[in-house]
Image (cartoon, rainbow, N blue to C red):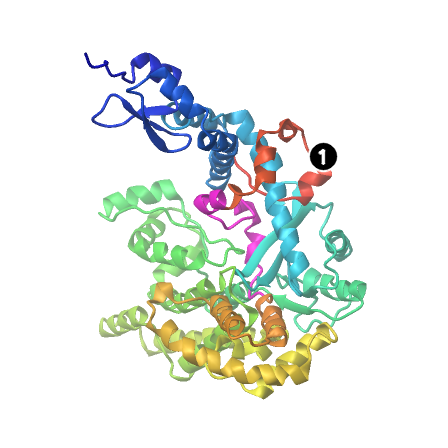
Amino acid sequence: MPKRKCVFTDKLKEEYKFLKQCQNTNDCVRCSTCNSEFSVEHRGRYDIENHIQSDRHKRLVKRCPQQCAAKEATFAYHTATHGLSFRTSDCTAKLIKKFFEPKYSGARTKTEAIIVNIIPPYIFNELLKDLKDVNFVTLTIDSSNRKEIKLTPVCVRYFNKNEGIKVKLLYFDQLPGETSDILVEHHLKCIKKYSIDSKVVCLCADNTNTNFGDVKRKGQGNVFRKLQKSLSRPILGIGCAAHILHNTVKTACDALSIDVEYTVRVTALKEFCEFANIEYKRVLSHGNTRFLSLLPAIERILLLFDALKSYFMAIENCPAVLLAFFKDPVSELFLKFVHGTVQMFQISILKLDSDYITASEATQVYEELVIKLEEQKENNFIPFAANQLLVKLKDDNTIDVDKENHFRKNMEGFYQAGINYLKLWENSFDKANKFKWLTLQNDPTWEEIEASAIIVVSIVPNSINVDQLFDERSFLVQVPRHLKPKWASQQNELTPKMHEKWKEIFDAFFRSNVSFLNIFKIIEFAMCLPGTSAPAEQLLNIKANSDLSCSQFHDKIKIDKCFLKKINASEKYEKKKDDEECCEPGPSTN
């Protein structure tokens, strides 16, 4: 009589939760720990116990705590990166434990401890390792006032030959004020703490008197000059190009005979929109310091222009300025002119508003804008929508020749004011124009490379061997020629950024076993020069000092045994000292 086969019973399922029954059979199971299948048909429970005692299973069981720790750390990173509340961790942990990983224990308390005490030091140590390897860094600074609290972040920008341009938050703290002495002391404290005094080659900040003095930078009492004196050597000073363009628009608009910034009474306006059968849209306000808010504000005003006009013409005691504005038929024409022209500035600002924009690229954007304004002024250019309205007003005899001449004179004043302001601040990029050849639009000449080398040596003496540099230059010309067809064939969204192109070039140098030490130092120097101070200003929007996706973070930490050991250790629940908290920026959450 044949022996009866054993099966994987419900009792065994409950007892050995790491085993899952295979499909279309009741005697074959899969072990989720070691990912192997085996049969229980011969001896049932004893087959399972034999599997548990196997070398493969034992070896992989030892890895389970590490695998679970990696999952818990990744979900903690996910919580911080995406700004999720700690409260969600309790529910998430229960669901993961029920559906996927019975040993998962990343509830609120553990998740918070990992985010606060484990991930920030890990990410920050990666930054410190990078700073040891690089030759040059730029400090990007800003002051952010939140009620009575003055936060002063210090970001570092550097070029990593494996990953390209990196912008990281190095330090931030509260300060009692914003005088140049207080700020310099703060920045020097950061520089000395992380031993980068010999590597700082540039200061990037907004173009305020405190940071750089006047427009000619002749003063000695500003942060830039005092920092140079403290470091006992020259450094470059680069202003924020995006702020300059924003201020250019404001200055140009001041040359017009209208004011595009004003407020309205929203509740009553909504009623007028309904009466006039116009879709109501909230009138956006434009902040004086927000360099991307002017264009959408003007667009919204133009959409609601008829309703606004009806509203202010109808109310009693309307402010005289607004009443005169809406009575004047040229007012809408001015708005459409500003709207059409500001779009050009908006495009330029969006090009600059990037962590990866270099000072040499910003200089190019800046100069192109000056050329466009000069051409528009020379040709009396009127944006299409404004020109259509002008033709209509003339055909309807709504405006006479004097009104038209008044508009054209204002238009010319707008262009001239913009050109004058841009040329006034063109020295804000210091010597960045000497690195234009890095954009690779043309083959770099020896004169261009030598001029760049002279600047690097003037900041960091003996950093470049000019004789070796000349030999490296010949190969430098050949490599981009081979890579340019590939770059040109890629779609716009896939076209590599400038720092990514240079990564490819250095990879080609390395594969060909060609020395590129001096060329690399010049590129590293130029790449660490930013076009804007936006990264420091966006500090309060940064969720983590890491650009890794959650999946990439998991791939990175799952092989780091030291990091995973800390996830399961009790030390993560210990509270940090206040001075450590201000020096090690990392993920934050609600």
Is 12 or 239 nearer to us in this picture? 12
Residue 141 located within the stretch drawn in magenta: no
Residue at x-position 70% and y-position 71%: 217
SS class, disc 1 = loop
Which residue is located at x 35 percent, y 42 percent? 268
Reading the image, the residue beneath label 1 is 577
Would residue 532 be counted in the magenta stretch?
yes
Q: Which residues are magenta?
A: 530-555
Residue at 62 percent across and 52 percent down: it is 127
- Quarter holding the N terminus? top left
> Relative to residue 121, is residue 441 depicted above or below?
below
Rendered residue at 54%/48% (across/down): 546
> Toward the viewer: 299 or 245?
245
Mark 1: amino acid: Lys
Q: Position of residue 436 (x, y in %)?
A: 54, 78
Q: In front here: 543 or 559?
A: 559
Q: How many marks?
A: 1
User: Would residue 451 be found to the left or right of residue 340 on screen?
Assistant: right
Q: Is residue 257 left or right of residue 278?
A: right
Residue 224 found in image quarter: bottom right
Q: Quadrant of residue 54?
A: top left
Q: Within 10 Å of the Cα at label 1, are there few (<14), some (14-19), or many (20+) other Cα atoms?
A: few
Percent position of residue 285, x then y: 44, 51
